[in-house]
Amino acid sequence: MKIGIIGAGQIGGTLTRRLRALGHDVFVANSRGPESLAGLASETGAHAVTTAEAARAGEVVVVTIPEGKVRELPRDLFSGVPESVVIVDTGNYYPRQRDGRIDEIEAGSPESRWVEHQLGRPVVKAFNNIYARHLLERGRPQGSPGRIALPVAGDDRKAKEAVLRLMEELGFDGVDAGGLDESWRQQPGTPVYATDLDAEGVRRALAEARKEREAGWRATAGSPGTFANPA
């Protein structure tokens, strides 16, 4: 499969490595340009491309950049991209640590619904609740005891199925977490976030989630700070 990845940070770099190891044709981009990705391209065999090229690269495009930077992507980034292309959002809103205040999210919009509006295209929320190192190292064959499961939320059944198949290849059980309006159940601060649960545990954690955002995950007058010193 041809896969575009916009963002080469912890999750983007990890997905580039894992998906290339599985034989997928990966086109990776970041905000600094293809030249800055020469090392990753050499290591993995991925194609270092521009953001616009990654958006048009293949059947799945993963957007994995800081939430606050989504507004800086070109408004026409996906113009002309076939509707069949699956767009995956791995992002999380960290207002106190990195992103600053995003009014719509503070007012209650699920993070990925906000991203969808910025991109002008439907998205599937996935790969946001696992540490990058665990994504790199803890995939296991189907049926393995304690196999980690990951939630997948989105409104298009076929798009979710495509993401669930990729998760299976990567060594994780995918759990259908409902439509995108339910994706708040896997946001930071919820029971499923960064917990490495199995499939039954993920379903239970999603059901136990509470919609009101905890104070630690809301913006303050001083936002943003840093991950070491949240504002």
Image (cartoon, rainbow, N blue to C red):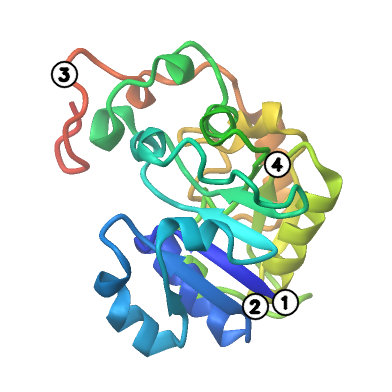
Can you tell which of label 2 and label 1 is closer to the viewer?
A: 2
Residue identified by numbered label 2:
140
Can you tell which of label 1 and label 3 is closer to the viewer?
A: 3
Q: Nearer the viewer, residue 50 or 62?
A: 50
As measured in the structure, the alpha-carbon distance from the residue carrying label 2 to the one carrying label 1 is 6 Å
Q: Are marks 1 and 4 in contact (CB under 8 Å)?
A: no
Residue identified by numbered label 3:
222
Number of the label disc, if any, that sits on residue 153: 4
Q: Residue at x 26, y 37 (%)?
A: 98
Determine which quarter of the picture holds residue 59.
bottom right
Residue type at numbered disc 1: Ser
Q: Are marks 2 and 1 in contact (CB under 8 Å)?
A: yes
Can you tell which of label 1 and label 4 is closer to the viewer?
A: 4
Identify whether 112 is placed above or below 176. above
As measured in the structure, the alpha-carbon distance from the residue carrying label 2 to the one carrying label 3 is 42 Å
Residue type at numbered disc 2: Arg
Is residue 133 something that shows in the picture? no
Q: Residue at x 58, y 46 (%)?
A: 78
Residue identified by numbered label 1:
144
**Mark before the other along the chain sequence, 1 or 4:** 1
Q: Residue at x 30, y 33 (%)?
A: 99
**Mark before the other along the chain sequence, 2 or 3:** 2
**Mark before the other along the chain sequence, 1 or 3:** 1
Q: Residue 220: where, in percent of width, then height?
A: 25, 16
Number of the label disc, if any, that sits on residue 152: none
